[in-house]
Image (spheres, rainbow, N blue to C red):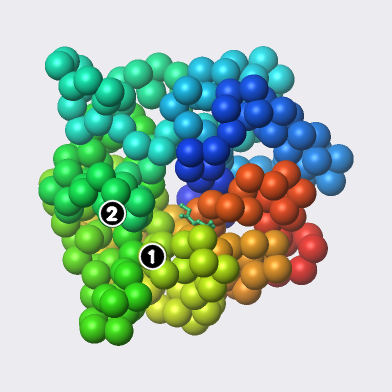
Amino acid sequence: MAIAPRTPLIAGNWKMNLDHLQAVAFVQKLHWTLKDAKHEDGSVEVAVFPPFTDLRTVQTLLDADKIPFALGAQDLSAHDSGAYTGEVSGAFLAKLDNRYVIIGHSERRQYHAESDEVVAAKVKAALRHGLIPVICVGETSEDLEKFGASAVPVAQLTAALAGVKADAEIVVAYEPVWAIGSGQAATPQQAQDVCATLRGVIAEKLGADAAAKTRVLYGGSVKAANIASFMREPDVDGALVGGASLVVDEFAAIIRYQKHVGV
Ligand code: 13P
């Protein structure tokens, strides 16, 4: 399915939750819920990011039942193949019809010591295999206090875009670390300010055309009750949702933000 430029993207990062059987039940239920609400009209792109072990099963279900959700992985290797025990190649993800891959999530930066260099190498690996990298950037609360909200995300995105060509399709997600899983979302204005600044980085590195086309998402304690306030902001093109993407009715309500609050 061709996606119009800047179509809002609501993406569910399941993190290490839901095994492949639970994933099937979840995707079916979400599909039925949205279908009942007549909300599979393409006005919002829905993407799910299950654990690696679920991907084949979910791909088969999406394909067999013609469910219009995009599939994405939560990480990939910077390498294409070879002696890298435990790693997953972008080539394998592309074979499973993944459209997206999350790169540089703060949990990987924090728990797996992923540096800006590793993130940049993974972005290139994703693009080599025709995957759209969802590049995550965000500051901790210490960074926020010391440098303000934009400095760290700008530095992280600048590093991640090194060597990326102007016509590459990417997605950027601003995920303040202090807002992830905390119940304390950024304010819509904070999200807008950083997302606009990140769009400026894209303009500088990849050109005005890329900046105009690229979707910049907000992530961090997004729920049905606050999604509309983010989506009203001109530089927020969607959301990367963690906890709330694991609850069918809540995630469906987030996807239906236009309907239930009239944005
Ligand atoms: P929460 O929505 O649970 O805060 O998680 C956000 C996130 O990390 C998505 O990648």
Q: Is residue 155 left or right of residue 103?
A: left
Q: Is residue 67 visible?
A: no
Foreground residue among 140 and 186: 140
Secondary structure of the residue carrying tag 1 is helix
Q: Which residue matches tag 2?
A: 110
Q: Residue at x 24, y 83 (%)?
A: 146
In the image, the residue with mark 2 has its CB under 8 Å from the nearest atom of ligand 1: no
Q: Earlier in the sequence, mark 1 or mark 2?
A: 2
* Badge nearest the viewer, 1 or 2: 2
Q: Which mark is residue 120?
A: none
Q: Judge the density around disc 2: few (<14), some (14-19), many (≥20) Cα neighbours within 10 Å.
A: few
Q: Amino acid at mark 1?
A: Val
- Cα separation, mark 1 vs mark 2, equals 10 Å
Q: What residue lies at 50% left-to-right and 54% top-to-bottom?
A: 240
Labels 1 and 2 touching (C-beta < 8 A): yes
The residue that disc 1 covers is 177
Placement of the C terminus among the 4 image quadrants: bottom right
User: Residue 109 appears at what percent x and percent y?
Assistant: 27, 52
Q: Mark 2 is on which residue type?
A: Gln
Q: Is the residue marked by circle 1 packed among few (<14), some (14-19), or many (20+) residues within 10 Å?
A: many
Q: Residue 234 placed where, x, y %? A: 51, 72
Q: Quadrant of residue 257 in the image? A: bottom right
Label 2: element kind = helix
Q: Residue furthest right?
A: 36
Snapshot quadrant of residue 246 = top right
- At x 49%, y 75%, the residue is 186
Can you give x and y, in whole percent of width and height, for residue 131 in the image? 36, 33
How far across and how far down the image is residue 74, in percent? 41, 38
Residue name at image x 38 percent, y 23 percent: 94
